[in-house]
Image: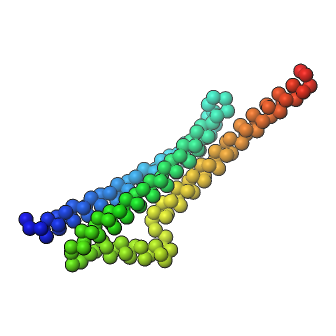
Amino acid sequence: MDRDELILKEYESYCTQKENFIDRNFRTNRFYMTAIVVLIFALIYTSNVVFLDKISATLIFALLGVSISALWWMNVDSYNTLIKIKYSNVIEKIEEKFPVKPFTEEYVSIEESRKNKVFMFSDIQKLIAAGAALFFFAVCVSEITPLVIAVFNKFVNLLLKAKCGI
């Protein structure tokens, strides 16, 4: 096997690995989307369940939803960074040895479309993750507010009893 054939084999292998990596990214996003939908259904069906004197299942699922949404956001960023590295640092360097550079041209086109503010798929993923995080955060606030008010009222009652000497 001569040098050119070896380079082509390595290029094909790396391109296949990159495609597998992108497929794994889609599977990961599907997992996060499914987890968020399951948590929303859990919020709906366990709205009357209360643990440990006033800590509701809704609060627990909402906190879990905020956490999963944040992890999803970070995961999208990580995959985007790694995919860019695979494009620019590896595939483009291998393509320097070829007369045609399809991935390099594709990457340049993607970067140009980003400059023109085209909404990319990863932006949509982040928007969904942020929307889910805001939804779950709002549910957390609605669940925590009565708890905080109850604690505040108990504190005020204790102060009043102490002041009155009871």
Name the residue: 67% across, 29% down: 53
Residue 112 appears in which quarter of the rendering?
bottom left
Q: Is residue 144 above or below residue 78?
A: above
Q: How far from the left and from the top, in percent, is residue 8? A: 17, 68
Q: Nearer the viewer, residue 27 or 21?
A: 21
Q: Can you see residue 24?
A: yes
Q: Is residue 33 visible?
A: no
Residue nearest the viewer, comparing 151 with 33:
151
Q: Position of residue 94 (x, y in %)?
A: 24, 68
Please identify the quarter of the rendering in which residue 150 is found: top right
Residue 100 appears left or right of 68: left
- Quadrant housing the N terminus: bottom left
State the image coordinates of residue 92 (x, y, percent, origin top left). 29, 70
The extreme right residue here reads: 164
67 displayed left or right of 47: left
From this viewpoint, which residue is outermost toward the top?
Answer: 166
Residue at image x 47%, y 75%? 115
Q: Residue at x 49, y 64 (%)?
A: 123
Most foreground residue, 51 or 45? 51
Whole-percent x and y of residue 166? 89, 21
